[in-house]
Amino acid sequence: MVSRVTALLTLEEVADYLRVTKKTIYRLLERNSIPATKVGRQWRFDKDSIDVWLRQNSIERGANVLVIDDDETLCSLFKETLEGVGHAVTTVSESPKGLELVKDRDYDLVFLDLKMPVMDGAELFRQIRMAKPELPVTIITGYPDSDLMMSALAHGPFGVMYKPFSSSDILTAVKTYLRFGMPTR
């Protein structure tokens, strides 16, 4: 008989392993969407079962992503990275045009630069929330402690990507939003 040693993760450990918040794990538990066992009053997660669950829930369809950033190099990085794995990417360098696209089209996810000319990212985020409250937004910033970030926080939850970042960070952000059933179109 071969005994199998299993690694049981705590809620905090599984959140760290999946690169999501504990709140996301609780949401998945409420929907019975993630394999878990209750030990006493605490949730435990079998790492092997989590890995199988991840493979079964991998995204097969491409996402429709909007990138609003005045840095053309970053826009190109998003476009090349995401289109290379089957996602549709629209990039725009002006906030008003980005807002117009959000209102006129359906996107699965928006990446939004915090420091933008004409209309800053915090104001644009506020207007996106008014137009499409459930649309997932990730704010791109090199200034996480700025007044603009604090202003954006007042308008609801969002993801954050800190500059500088890599192609793998972009892919992880998109996979995380799509894998965990964040609101999409």
Image: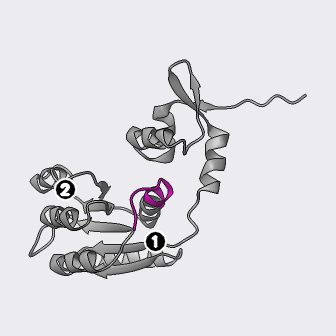
Q: Confirm whether the magenta stretch covers residue 177.
A: yes
**Which element is circle 2 on?**
loop
Residue at which label 1 appears: 63
Q: From this viewpoint, is residue 163 visible? A: no
Q: Quadrant of residue 140?
A: bottom left
Q: Position of residue 144 (x, y in %)?
A: 21, 52
Question: Contact, CB < 8 Å: mark 2 with mark 1?
Answer: no
The region drawn magenta spans 175-185
Cα distance in 3D space between marks 2 and 1: 27 Å
Q: Inspect the image, locate mark 2, and give the three-letter code of the amino acid beneath it.
A: Tyr
User: In the current view of this chain or complex, which residue is farthest to the right?
Assistant: 1
Q: Position of residue 165 (x, y in %)?
A: 36, 62
Q: Where is residue 132 in the image (x, y as percent from the top left)?
A: 26, 66
Q: Quadrant of residue 138?
A: bottom left
Q: Is residue 16 above or below residue 87?
A: above
Label 2 crowd (10 A; few <14 / some 14-19 / many >=20): few
Q: Which residue is drawn at 67% across and 41% down?
A: 48
Residue closest to the eye, 50 or 184: 184
Q: From this viewpoint, is residue 159 visible? A: yes
Q: In this view, does 88 lie above or below 151?
A: below
Q: In this view, does 148 lie above or below 19?
A: below
Please state if 170 lies on the left or on the right of 45 as rendered: left
Figure quadrant of the N terminus: top right
Residue closest to the eye, 135 or 66: 135
Residue at which label 2 appears: 143
Q: Residue at x 78, y 31 (%)?
A: 4
Q: Where is residue 126 in the image (x, y as percent from the top left)?
A: 16, 61
**Which element is circle 1 on?**
loop
